[in-house]
Amino acid sequence: MTEAPPLEPGWWAQLASVFATPPIDRLRDFLRTELRSGKQLLPAKTDWFNAFAATPFDRVRVVILGQDPYPTPGHAHGLSFSVRRDVRPLPKSLVNIFQELADDLGIRNTSGDLTPWADQGVLLLNAVLTVPARQPAGHQNQGWELITDAAISALAAREKPVVFVLWGAAAQRKAALIAPHNHNQRHLIIQSPHPSPLSAYRGFFGSRPFSRINDFLQQHGEPPIDWRT
């Protein structure tokens, strides 16, 4: 991020002021230094803001919050939990997400590219938008969270109801950003353990998030998400 990012206009209206702050200047400097040192950053620079490009601000109906991109080269492309269409085998967390989807709605996906979800208003947002190859969480607490927290707060402040899906403790801490705006419970917050193999059996399986999302959307006059990829 060496200049103003190519954000969709609706997102830029919400986030431009954040990009003008000293902490984001420091993030820019940090990322430049990482790149100049020869580190491979994931996803590719052109995909850092892919979540915002794929799902414009005014079209967001659901947020599925991840932590940071997949650290395996060739996997991450800027959408949380999503991988490029040709990736095999799928990451284990995504395998578990698809297992729960099959148990919940009978849908059995084989492609791990979740772009069809994003196209329908599902913001697939990681809290941190870059990671060094093979170094999970390597860019946490460098400034990305200021941008993504502002995005979550902006969505929560809208009158239009949104479903926020918070899997795991790190995502669930973001509920504090939503609560001040969630008057009369107009937004739905779905919380469960993370779908990783370490925690999926502690309550992610059986949580039925996909049918709960669609029920909520339909109750508010919105079409359901077609979860097929």
Image (cartoon, helix red, strand yellow):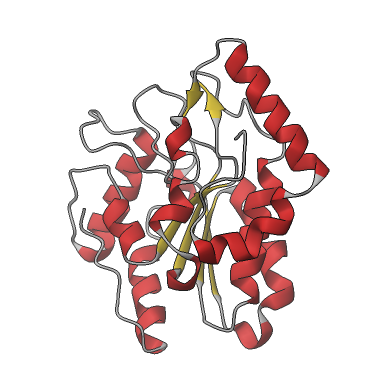
Residue at 50 percent of width and 17 percent of height? 40
- Residue 183, placed above or below residue 126: below
Residue at 50 percent of width and 67 percent of height? 57
- In the rendered image, residue 217, in percent from the top left (x then y), is placed at 39, 80
Residue at 61 percent of width and 14 percent of height? 36
Residue at 55 percent of width and 10 percent of height? 38
Quarter where residue 159 is shown: bottom right
Residue 79 is left or right of residue 227, and the answer is right
Foreground residue, 137 or 157? 157
Foreground residue, 226 or 204? 226
- In the rendered image, residue 219, in percent from the top left (x then y), is placed at 39, 88
Residue 91 is left or right of residue 126, and the answer is left
Quarter where residue 210 is shown: bottom left
Foreground residue, 153 or 20? 20
Q: Residue furthest right?
A: 22
- In the rendered image, residue 112, in percent from the top left (x then y), is placed at 27, 42
Residue 131 visible in image: yes
- In the rendered image, residue 41, in percent from the top left (x then y), is placed at 51, 23
The N terminus - image quarter: top right
- Residue 32, placed above or below residue 92: above
